Image (spheres, coloured by chain):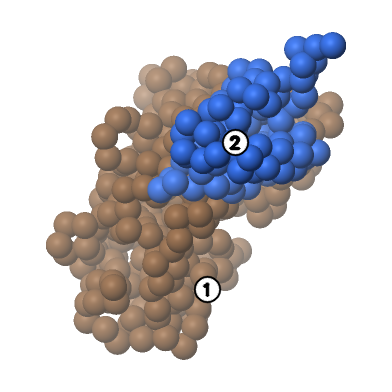
Amino acid sequence: MTDSTPWLRTNAPRLETAVQEWLLESRMPLPTNLAITIELGDSVPAFQDSRTAYRQGFVEIRAGAPQGWAQVRWADRAVARVDATRPIADVFLTRDAAENLEPLLRGFLLVVLIFLWKREGLFHLHAGTARDPLGRGWMLTGNTHSGKSTTMALLARRGWEVGTDDAAFLSAQTGPVEVYGFRDLIALRPGGLDLIGCQGGTPLPGRGKTAFTVEELGGRWIQVVEPEIVLFAEGTGSRTTLTPTEPAEILHRLIQNSPWVLFEAAGAAEHLQLLARLGGRARCYKAVLGPDIFERPDGLMGLLP
Amino acid sequence: MSEIRYRRHNDLRIAELQGEGVVLHLGERRYFSVNETGLAILEATSEPRTFAELVARVMETFEVGSEEAETTIRAFLDQCVSAKVILEEQG
């Protein structure tokens, strides 16, 4: 533990620096009384836990009743135990996990943080966030292969303010729903990279992607967006289309992209009401993303019905 | 003989959006939609309610006759009880 990171205690100084830099760079407000302990060792504990696991990528999550605390596991490489109500996590890592920073931070620790921020009333949603040149907030939700990152990179190239391409956090304040963007690199697959036509970037060989900051793409980063327009990405097609979403479908799609609402009783009502407020205030569309948006100077704006 | 009362499961969380209801069942980690009548019944059953109390509630809220209210509520309760969304309790 150091004075600069009173919330992080670890026996791995190099890892402490990496985690600290990554989290501070995210610009996310750290939970009050956040306490993370990271213990590096030869193996990680196997907690007795018969709860059904939910998988996100290579990470397994067990949360909710009857134990209360949440378990986040990356095979036999890393495991975290997150307190049921407080932003406190004990993390155990093998040296192998610690040497693979990219999956450790963006795959495993991000999920741990999702639970820690949930304790503070910030609820994660798989979504990109942006503000258009007219000052309107946009949110683009969808699964891993729905084209979120490429679209957010395009918007940054067109000079939009972009908050995140996937890690959005809904804030439980009163008034308009605010969505925080976890500032991180936007990672593009080769196909997306060709469409964006941007040189440079940081290669991520382990993921087969190239990553850019919003600024490298020509945009500006924005921390908080109040979404007026929500797009549910349905995949890619030959042409981009936006179709109004029926009310019954809006909440279903928001829940699909914020599955944590189903895990724990604590905060579930607040989380669900926040999703309903978001869906009730924003104009919501199903979006099929096509290559034509790369040819349109106004991008998505001109497609709004 | 005591009367049956209906109470929604403690694991439910409910939200409404433009007249449509969405119900989370936390214990089973699933969610589903209900129409506005179903939403009213689920909201009413946060406390144990008799069938007659539910009929009165639906008649008052939606301005429908007793026969229509009874048919609608019976069908909804049957589905919910079988799915363990609403529990039956002896008065």
Residue at x 53% of width, y 19% of height? A86
Amino acid bearing label 1: Gly
Identify the hue of chain B.
Answer: blue
Q: Do the residues under discs 2 and 1 have CB atoms within 8 angstroms?
A: no
Q: Are marks 2 and 1 on the same chain?
A: no
Task: Measuring from the top left, give residue A223's x and y in whole percent.
Answer: 28, 45
Task: Measuring from the top left, give residue A259's x and y in whole percent.
Answer: 59, 45
User: Quick check: A95 above or below A196?
Assistant: above
SS at mark 2? helix
Name the residue beneath numbered marker 1.
A235
Residue A47 falls in which quadrant of the image? top right
Task: Measuring from the top left, give residue A293's x and y in whole percent.
Answer: 34, 81
Amino acid bearing label 2: Ser
Identify the hue of chain A.
Answer: brown
Which label lies toward us, 2 or 1?
A: 2
Which chain contains the residue that carries disc 2?
A: B
Which chain contains the residue that carries disc 1?
A: A
Name the residue beneath numbered marker 2.
B66
State the residue in front, A142 or A103: A142
SS at mark 1? strand
Residue at x 28% of width, y 48% of height? A225
